[in-house]
Amino acid sequence: MTDRPVQELLNLPFFQVLEIQKMLREIEGEMAEEGVDLEKKMNQYSHLYDQFESMGGYEYIKLQEEFIQVFNLNNKLTRHYCGLSGGEKQYIRLALTVFSHSELIILDEPLTFLDAKKAKWLKNYLVDSSKTYLIVSHNSKFVDAFSTKIFDIDNGIIKVYQGSYLDYLEKKSQYEQREKQGNKTIDLIVEKKKETLEKKYEWIKKAENKHQHAVLIRRLERDIKKLQNQKTKFEARKEYDFRNNLESVTTNDFKKEIYLDIVDLKHEFGCRLLYKELHLKLYSTDRILISGENGSGKTTLLKIIEGSILPSKGEIFRNPNVRMKYISQEVIFNDENVTVLDYCKKITRVGDVILEDAIDSLYGDEEFRLKRLHMLSGGERKRLQIFSEILLGFDLLLIDEPTTYMDEHSKLKIVSLLNDFQGCIILVSHDEFFIKKLMLQEYVIQNSSLKKEG
C-alpha cells in the first residue's frame, strides 16, 4: 500500500463501480463511430447502465468526490501513500475502512487527526449508513449522534445498554443505584449474622457439645462469605469526563470532580513573602493560566502543587485518584542517544503504527522519528516532552513556560497538543501569542495572593 498513489487507493472500495463507468464511457465513444452495430451497442450500454444504477454508482462517485474535498486531498491524489503526513495517512485508512463492502465496520478512536469539519462529515456518514459499526470513542457528543447500543466495560464486566448515549447515562445511574441499595441490604444481613456468630464464639467456650456449635459457626462463616461475594464491587474511579458532552446536557447535570484544593497557603522565600493567603480550588474541567510579575512565585506555586516544595503554611488536598505531571522549563532526557521513536515507544508503550503516525503529524517529517534526541532543537525537545506526557495519560499537567526558544510553527503545534488534551491544565506562560490560542481562565499572583481575572 505504501508505494501506491492516493487516487488509486481511494478507488479501491469503488473498483467495480468505476470499472463499469469506464466501460460505459468506452461504449459511448464507440457509438459515435461509423459502421458500428448501434442496436447492439445500445443493448450493451443499457445493460451496464442498469447494473451501474443498481450498485448506486452515482452515489458512490459523489461520495468519493465529497470525501476528497472535505479531507483536502485534491492536490495529493498523485502523491504516494508513503509521502503523506500521519494525519493524511489516517484519512486514507479511514476511507478504505468506511467505504469497504464489509457489513461490520470496527473503528478505534476514529476522530483522531480530524478537525471539526471532518468529524462532522464522518458523523453524518455514519448516521446515514445502513452498516453495523462497533466504535471506540471518548467523544460522547459524536457517539450520541448514531449509537443504538452502548457496551460499557466496568470492573472487568461488559454490560450492554440499549439506546442512545443519554439513555445509557440514565440507565447506568439507575443500575448503580439499585446495586448499591442491594449492597446495603446484604450489609444489614451480614451484620446480623456476624452478631449471631459472635454469640456462638462465646457459647462454644462454655458448651459441652462443642462439635455442634462448631458446625453452626462454620455454616455462619460460609454464609457471610457467600453474601459478601454477592455484593457488586465498585472500584474507585474518576467520574466520566463530560467536557465534550452533548449540547443538551448542562454543566449542572453532573458533579465536577475536585482535583486540587489549596486553603490559606503561605510561603516565604528567604526573607520574602510570596503568598500570605492563597486559595485555589481546581476541578476536572479547569484549564487555567497563572500569570504575574517575574519573581512573584509562579514556578514555586507549580512545584508546591506537585509536592517537590513544602509550603510554609496552609492545607493542600490532592485527589489521590488524579495522575499529575509537572513539566519544567528545562527538558532533560536520560539517554540523549536514542531515537525519537524509540524514546516514545519505551515510555508510552503505544502501538508502533499509531505512534509513528502521531510523531509524523507532530513534526511533519517521516524521517524525524529516526532523529536522535541530542539532535533536537529546544522547541522540538519541548514538543516531544509534552507529547509523550500526554500519551502517558496524565489527568493534570502542570506546565512551566512551554514555548521558550520556540518559533511560531512550534508554538502552534503545542497549542494543538494542549487543545486536544482531555485533562486538566495549569499553565505558566508570558507568551501572549501562545496564550491567545488557548482557552484558559487567568489567575494572577498579586500582592501575595492569587486573584481570578474576568
Image (spheres, rainbow, N blue to C red):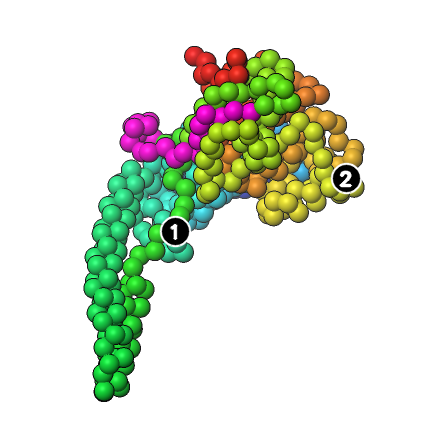
Q: Position of residue 443 (x, y in %)?
A: 49, 18
Q: Nearer the viewer, residue 33 or 159?
A: 159
Marker disc for residue 278: none
Secondary structure under tag 1 reads loop
Amino acid tagged 1:
Glu
Q: Quadrant of residue 417?
A: top right
Q: Position of residue 210 (x, y in %)?
A: 26, 85
Q: Magenta stretch containing residue 253, yes or no? A: yes
Left/right placement of residue 22 relative to residue 159 reads right
Q: Which quadrant would the N terminus be assigned to in this image?
A: top right
* 342 relative to 306, above or below: below
Give the labeled residue for mark 2. 336
Q: Position of residue 107 (x, y in %)?
A: 46, 44
Left/right placement of residue 167 relative to residue 347 reads left
Amino acid tagged 2:
Glu
Give the labeled residue for mark 1. 235
Q: Residue at x 66, y 33 (%)?
A: 384
Q: CB under 8 Å between callouts 2 and 1?
A: no
Secondary structure under tag 2 reads loop
Provide the residue span drawn in magenta.
246-267
Residue 110 in sight from this viewpoint:
no
Q: Which quadrant would the C terminus be assigned to in this image?
A: top left
